[in-house]
Amino acid sequence: MPTTHTAAALAAFALMLTGTGAAQATDATPVRSSAAVAATPGPAISVDTTTGRHAIDPHIYGMNFPEETLAKELRLPVGRWGGNATSRYNYTNDAYNAGSDWYFEDLHYDNDTSALPDGSQADKFVEQNRRTGTDTLMTVPMTGWAAAGRDNGCGFSIAKYGPQQGSDAQWRPDCGNGKKPDGTLITGNDPADTSTPAGADFVKGWVQYLDRTYGGAGNGGVRFYNLDNEPDLWHATHRDVHPAGVGYDELRDSTYATAAAVKDADPSAQTLGPVGWGFNSLIYSGLDQQKCSEQGGGCWSDPPDRAAHGGVQFAPWYLQQMKAYQQAHGRRILDYFDEHIYPQQSGVSGSADDAATQALRLRSTRQLWDPSYVDESWINQPIQFIPRMHSLVDQNYPGTKLAISEYNWGALDQVDGGLAEADVLGIFGREGLDLATLWSPPKATDPGAYAFRMYRNYDGKGGAFGDTAVHAASADQDKLSVYAAERSTDHATTVMVVNKTTGDLTAPVTLTSGSTLPAAAQVYRYGQADPAAIEHAADQPLSGGSFTATFPAYSVTEYVVPEGSAQTTGPSAPGTPTASAIGPDHVTLAWPAATPASAPLADYRVYSGDPATTAPLATVTAPATTARLTGLTPATSYTFRVVATDTAGRGSPPSNPVQVTTSQATTSSCTIAYQVGNDWGTGFTATIKVTNRAAPVNGWQLGFTFAGDQKVTQGWNGTWSQMADTVTVKDAGWNASLPTGASTTIGFNGTYTGTNTAPGAFTLNSTPCTTAGTAAAATLTVPTGHASPHHAAH
């Protein structure tokens, strides 16, 4: 195909370059309130800077393929090279295969080929990010294939495979859509028509090249790597090379190989997976999604691939396998648990912008967090997407960060779409997400871009929303949503209020601070009154921290409250600690809270000895007032004191001391941590962490006894057997070695009637173990799987 045709095809392919993003309307008009209608009472808003404090990771303000000028203006923290076409991008020839997005054609970028891989489009993407100070999130392929050549072929040649339902009639008439005239799929095609094998070694070579060219992840190079893109849809998006849905085992094994290759090439790089397409990706493997789409009916409630893996839903099983790898090999290969989300409510993620869709778009953001919001789509249940991701990680692979590398609430070129984006960014910060990249970024003049400006550059001079979240609440988040954070550079408090209604709302606002409030706050506003600018409005007087304000219809208002007047003293001393749960090497301390002075409390630090001359044994974030100290010496007397520190770095006087003597050393050879991950009334999933406290073990057998009517139905990371109420687990071989202090985690699925009481009488190689405690099941309801419609947004 001539180069001019290639360029035209690439232009037509712009939206499909990295996935199926939401198209943007150009002629929709937002619903506007009448200026003659008086403001109505709105919900009360409260902000308290002394509580609810946690860091906001700036990487939540990212985009896929950002435009350079906008990225520079926003100081964009992260830019992603991702989506469907990156699943088969070949860095050696600067080509990719479009998959189902464009007739399964090999396409290429119009760059100089003489020095490839130097000068590729991926290189240019990294270089743009370096110019704008943006971290790169690069997608690496795991399909097993990469584009073989530049405009070199298509997956379903009509000449080779017969007549088809559709073809690229304008540019490559021989390239079909892979469907016979009757709509059935063509099978048995040759992947080599378009692609060349590309496994973990291919990925390793690319990361090594990027490391040589731009430095390692810790030295200005590519910082993040996505482990492909939406692999649970490969059977549709890349079925010319991967016609079978990806099963549990295949994705685990390819993740092991590819993530390890990335870490081998650049140990400081961070990886993100499994990069599923949406809510069903938490529940089903790609193979189950494919099979159940074909079979329908009861398949969705009992899919075959899940049944073959103990009935465990896909996401918890995947995280458990990543944890098992770290335990077996001594290194983490998955840093972020990454799933995409596109709202499935009709029209929301696209360009529809009628009044009903606007209202639905603005309330549907609640699916990210709200347990009372039942998703208004085929999902038809509370999603709580970010809390659910937190729960999955906490139960199955603690320490893993959370990412959403694709999302889009639609209509970014309309005011309501901009308001939804501002609401989503606030939710990301409040709910503790660690990284996010908007799919199909807005143009610099779109309301969606102004949503980012309100967080990253509200005054045109780099003014930014705070980086430490603080408590903020609205009596009705559907009308006025509110988010607040303190800025570390100047300790100003920033408060973002989104009016998601079509009428002006007058609401009381209460601001509680650990310092004396200034006389007034600066006010910045964006909305339908002027969709092309952020207004610097008149200052808002702060009358003792309470005021009433009118929030215009369809607007985002940001208050910037300068740091209050300083006081010369730090917080008061905490109360006298008390000790409990005293063991040979541990103790739990609790103390009455300190009183903050001019700044909110940041943390408490526990000392043994003089706080002026020794390092703290433990630091806990306020408002927590307990600490468990470990690693103590048996039968030893300690004197503990607690010091409070505020956000300005000022410390309190030390508390009164408490003296504690640890107990004699235990003779236990091991400790057990038993945790129930999910419990649905008749069955459950549990894990057991075994820690060897005695001499090194090479080959082990764990025993324990159930206290009720529990039965093990399937176990992993060991060979399981049960006789009556007694369970025995033998090592799996790869985890047979347990040096002193080493741990391994095993797990099982079980059934029960009556009460699911934790088991006891644990032994390791017939020697009794100490049980460290049990953890209750998650409070989130286990999600129910449903068939996703063929038009599901992703």
Image (cartoon, grey):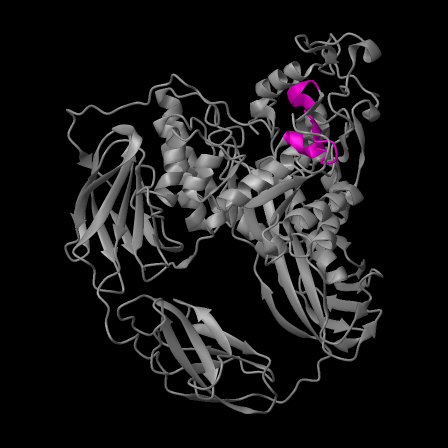
Q: Tally the numbered discs.
A: 0
Q: Quadrant of residue 427?
A: top left
Q: Is residue 722 left or right of residue 348?
A: right
Nearer the observer, 433 or 260: 260
**Does the magenta portion include 89?**
yes
Q: Is residue 105 left or right of residue 594?
A: right
Farthest residue to the front: give it: 114
Quarter containing the N terminus: top right
**Does the magenta portion include 177?**
no
* 196 up-or-down from 537: above or below: above
Residue 235 in view, yes or no: yes
* 70 up-or-down from 493: above or below: above
Quarter containing the C terminus: top right
Q: Quadrant of residue 273?
A: top right
Q: Residue at x 63, y 56 (%)?
A: 397
Q: Is residue 368 left or right of residue 1?
A: left
* 336 up-or-down from 705: above or below: above
Image coordinates for residue 309, horizontal then vertical, percent: 75, 45
Image coordinates for residue 39, horizontal then vertical, percent: 17, 33
Image coordinates for residue 606, horizontal then vertical, percent: 46, 79
Nearer the observer, 787 or 657: 657
Residue 270 in view, yes or no: no
The span picked out in magenta is: 84-103
